[in-house]
């Protein structure tokens, strides 16, 4: 169990590697329309440019890591400091998020009149309600909501993390796993009910918290189950089974996509999302606990660094991956290079210094969790 013990104590570099893969999937998907048709429509690009899978991986990792931190804090302090949780979250998310919104407005007002900004949608994005924008406005958007559209995923996360620390603190430890598992099991039924009862929301089913939040919850559940040492010892052999690993990889990377093409809508709502979430959680456990050559790749400095940059890359990408603009910065392949350059500058000179301020709000008080402490965490 030495690998599991190490994973409990140290920063999980392999998850930064998975973040790198995820953000590359998203960037390629958004850049496809700027690529030459021969490349953008190629089978290889159809496989690699999978923003759907990339975002799902982000969600599961997010729920997993946040819950690990909550488990650690409660084990060492006996409670959760909700106020400081929200403050730390604000330091992590707010600065470059609002800088991006201001930047779009400046470009709109002073440089590129072709950029269309619906100010109602802008307002919804700025308060993390973009994933419900269809309920508030029907203004035609010639850019398809492009410049703020990627914030649906961040909106869902922020809505989730308003609730999750409170649930974690208030629901008795012995009941929390059952409550989380119950919500996950109910989510497909909620999706189907939304489809029939709220037809105007059909296009947003993957984006709304009550219909898509199980991707984050499965990560939370994974962290809760992981904290049970006896249970963890039982499932470790399944992580080391190469046949199971091959089957999960085949499903996540190929089979699920084929089923989505063959049975669009129904398959995804009823069972597809749930199976994909479980598959991703398995791969996260595998990458964390099972030494392998692939895990070594995930831990390479360059790959990890892309994962570290992933939030800045996510925020700034939309400015440079829009096919409706013929400016040099929006043309492939330099647009991807510019995204990385801007993402690096954003991380190095804005995100990283501000993240250092988080130390005033709890960082340093919470030490690495020891094996015996995990037993009382959940």
Image (cartoon, rainbow, N blue to C red):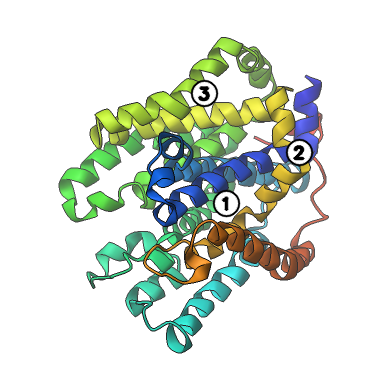
Residue 165: numbered disc: 1
- Going 70% across and 29% down the picture, which residue do you hit? 295
Residue 300: numbered disc: 2
- Asked whether the residues under the numbered discs 2 and 1 touch, taking CB atoms below 8 Å apart as contact, a structural biologist would say no
Q: Is residue 267 visible?
A: no
Cα–Cα gap, marks 2 and 1: 33 Å
Instruction: Give the camera-side residue of 15 and 294.
Output: 294
For marks 1 and 3, give the one nearer the viewer: 3
Q: Is residue 101 left or right of residue 208?
A: right
For residue 4, above or below residue 191? above
- Going 64% across and 25% down the picture, which residue do you hit? 286
**Please, what secondary structure does the residue beneath circle 2 have?**
loop
Q: Which residue is mark 3?
A: 249
Marks 2 and 1, the one that precedes in the sequence: 1
For marks 3 and 2, give the one nearer the viewer: 2
For residue 260, above or below residue 168? above
Instruction: Give the camera-side residue of 132 and 242.
Output: 242
**Please, what secondary structure does the residue beneath circle 3 have?**
helix
Q: Is residue 100 left or right of residue 78?
A: left
- Going 74% across and 70% down the picture, which residue do you hit? 349
How many labels, in total?
3
For the view shown, which residue lies furthest in the bottom direction? 110
**Please, what secondary structure does the residue beneath circle 1 have?**
helix
């Amino acid at each position: 169990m030495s690998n599991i013990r190490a994973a409990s104590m140290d920063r999980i570099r392999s998850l930064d590697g998975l973040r790198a893969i995820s953000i590359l999937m998203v960037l390629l998907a958004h850049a496809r329309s700027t690529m030459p048709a021969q490349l953008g429509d190629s089978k290889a690009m159809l496989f690699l440019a999978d923003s759907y899978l990339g975002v799902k991986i982000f969600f599961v990792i997010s729920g997993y890591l946040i819950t690990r931190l909550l488990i650690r804090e409660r084990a060492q302090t006996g409670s959760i400091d909700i106020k400081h949780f929200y403050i730390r979250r604000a330091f992590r998310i707010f600065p470059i998020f609002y800088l991006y919104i201001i930047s779009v407005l400046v470009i709109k007002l002073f440089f590129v009149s072709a950029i269309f900004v619906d100010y109602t949608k802008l307002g919804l994005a700025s308060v993390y309600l973009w994933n419900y924008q269809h309920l508030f406005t029907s203004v035609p958007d010639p850019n398809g909501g492009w410049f703020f559209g990627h914030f649906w995923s961040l909106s869902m996360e922020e809505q989730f993390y308003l609730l999750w620390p409170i649930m974690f603190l208030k629901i008795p430890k012995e009941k929390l796993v059952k409550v989380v598992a119950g919500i996950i099991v109910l989510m497909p039924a909620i999706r189907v009910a939304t489809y029939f009862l709220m037809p105007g929301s059909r296009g947003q089913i993957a984006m709304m918290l009550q219909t898509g939040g199980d991707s984050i919850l499965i990560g939370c559940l994974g962290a809760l189950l992981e904290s049970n040492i006896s249970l963890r010892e039982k499932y470790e052999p399944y992580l080391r089974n190469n046949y199971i690993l091959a089957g999960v990889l085949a499903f996540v990377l190929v089979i699920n996509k084929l089923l989505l093409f063959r049975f669009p809508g129904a398959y995804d709502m009823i069972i597809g999302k749930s199976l994909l979430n479980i598959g991703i959680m398995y791969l996260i456990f595998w990458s964390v606990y099972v030494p392998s050559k692939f895990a070594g790749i995930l831990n390479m400095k360059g790959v990890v660094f892309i994962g570290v940059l992933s939030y800045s890359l996510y925020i700034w990408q939309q400015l440079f991956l829009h096919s409706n603009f013929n400016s040099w910065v929006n043309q492939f392949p330099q647009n991807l290079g510019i995204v990385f350059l801007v993402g690096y500058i954003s991380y190095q000179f804005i995100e990283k210094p501000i993240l250092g301020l988080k130390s005033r709000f709890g960082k340093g008080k919470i030490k690495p969790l020891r094996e015996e402490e995990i037993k009382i965490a959940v």
